[in-house]
Amino acid sequence: MQGADRPDRKKLHHDVPHWIEDGSLFFVTVNCSERGTDQLTLPAVAEGLLDAARFYHDQRKWHITLWLLMPDHVHALLSFSRQVVMEDLFKSWKRYTARQFGIVWQDGFFDHRLRDGHEENAKHHYIRQNPVRKGLCASPEEWPHQWRCSREGLLIRG
């Protein structure tokens, strides 16, 4: 969505380059078209979005390290196979969730490959603290709208 108050945006390429190691971790943000409105953390919608994310995880389309819903955006730490075209994967996921839950997503998404453990720890902390910084809960453990991968590789809520 572009208008007088928004500059033209460059099209980002989201495919995983051939030289990137399989399983590299990416920080991903997906925004609703209308910011500032709670579309994603309404109970039935949040449950469905988390289930859809877990379905893609279980189908090995992506591997969730952390997936957290905010009222108008999603933050995730994900890894993908090099054979996956991230753009196609997110288009499919957004199309499904838009149809199922009436969410209007912004075109595209933001991704950044995390290059080392320091970046991973910083992004993990940033994501988990997001609902606390916004005054939605007192501690990251209280936020119900998230999946995290346990040390054993299992997805756990909260």
Image (spheres, rainbow, N blue to C red):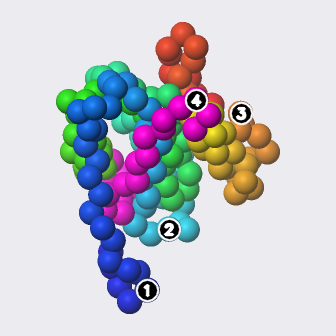
Quadrant containing the C terminus is: top right
Q: Give the labeled residue for mark 3.
A: 141
Which structural element holds mark 1?
A: loop
Q: Are marks 3 and 2 in contact (CB under 8 Å)?
A: no
Which structural element holds mark 3?
A: helix
Q: Mark 4 belongs to which amino acid?
A: Gly
Disc with the residue nearer the chain's start (4 vs 3) = 4
Q: Is residue 124 left or right of residue 39?
A: right
The relative height of residue 67 versus residue 149 in the rendered view (above or below) is below
Q: Give the labeled residue for mark 2.
A: 35
Q: Give the labeled residue for mark 1.
A: 5
Q: Give the labeled residue for mark 4.
A: 117
Q: Mark 3 belongs to which amino acid?
A: Glu
Q: Position of residue 51 (x, y in %)?
A: 41, 33
**Please, which residue is most extreme toward the right here?**
138
Q: Position of residue 25 (x, y in %)?
A: 44, 32
Q: Mark 1 belongs to which amino acid?
A: Asp
Answer yes or no: is residue 143 visible: no
Which residue is at 40% across, 53% downward? Answer: 110
Q: Position of residue 30 (x, y in %)?
A: 42, 53
